[in-house]
Amino acid sequence: MESKALQAHAKRVALELPFTELCWPFGPEFDVFKVEGKIFMLAAVAHGRPHISLKSDPQKSLLNQQIYRGIEPGYHLNKKHWISVYASDDITPELVTDLVAESWNRVVDKLPKKTQKRLRPD
């Protein structure tokens, strides 16, 4: 998956998730995606490399970093809880969709039960 396509796809997926807010608290060069005021995705460029950063389960994060060349520890973020995804031929749109949804769900899982129920009415 190519850099611009990676970011465009990730942004589209993030904005389709319920109650997602796009904002720029760190300046116009960082697209920040939040749910209930909590960040679950950032889209930016680091050292000329467009990427997205997402929350991730620490063990799953380590496994994904071993499997996919395009997944690295979170750039300028907590390396245990965040990953950065870069363009690579082993990064697919389906993988990006799954990773963005997982990040959103990790944030929602930490919210109060009443809020979770409102965001994910099942």
Image (cartoon, rainbow, N blue to C red):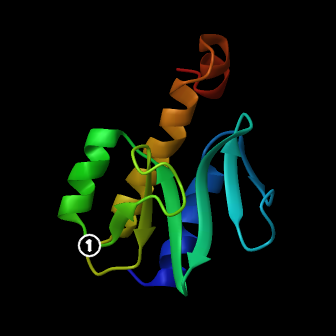
* Picture residue at 26% right of the left edge, 60% below the top: 65
Q: Is residue 70 above or below residue 74?
A: below
Q: Residue at x 77, y 61 (%)?
A: 26
Quadrant housing the N terminus = bottom left
Residue depicted at x 67% and y 19%: 115
Residue tagged 1: 69
**Residue 110 left/right relative to 26:** left
* Up-down relation of residue 35 to residue 5 (above or below): above
User: Which structural element holds mark 1?
Assistant: loop
Which residue is at the front of the view, 10 or 61?
Answer: 61
In the image, residue 34 lies at what x, y percent? 69, 45
Question: Outermost residue, bottom direction?
Answer: 48
Is 96 displayed left or right of 90 in the figure?
Answer: right
- Against 42, residue 88 (above or below) is below
How far across and how far down the image is residue 69, in percent? Answer: 26, 72
Q: Three-letter amino acid code at disc 1? A: Arg
Question: Does 57 sit above or below residue 48?
Answer: above
* Corner quadrant of residue 60: top left
Query: In this image, 82 relative to 116: left or right?
Result: left
* Residue 56 screen position, x and y as percent: 41, 45
Q: Residues within 10 Å of mark 1 (few under 14, many from 20)?
A: some
**What is the quadrant of residue 59 in the picture?**
top left
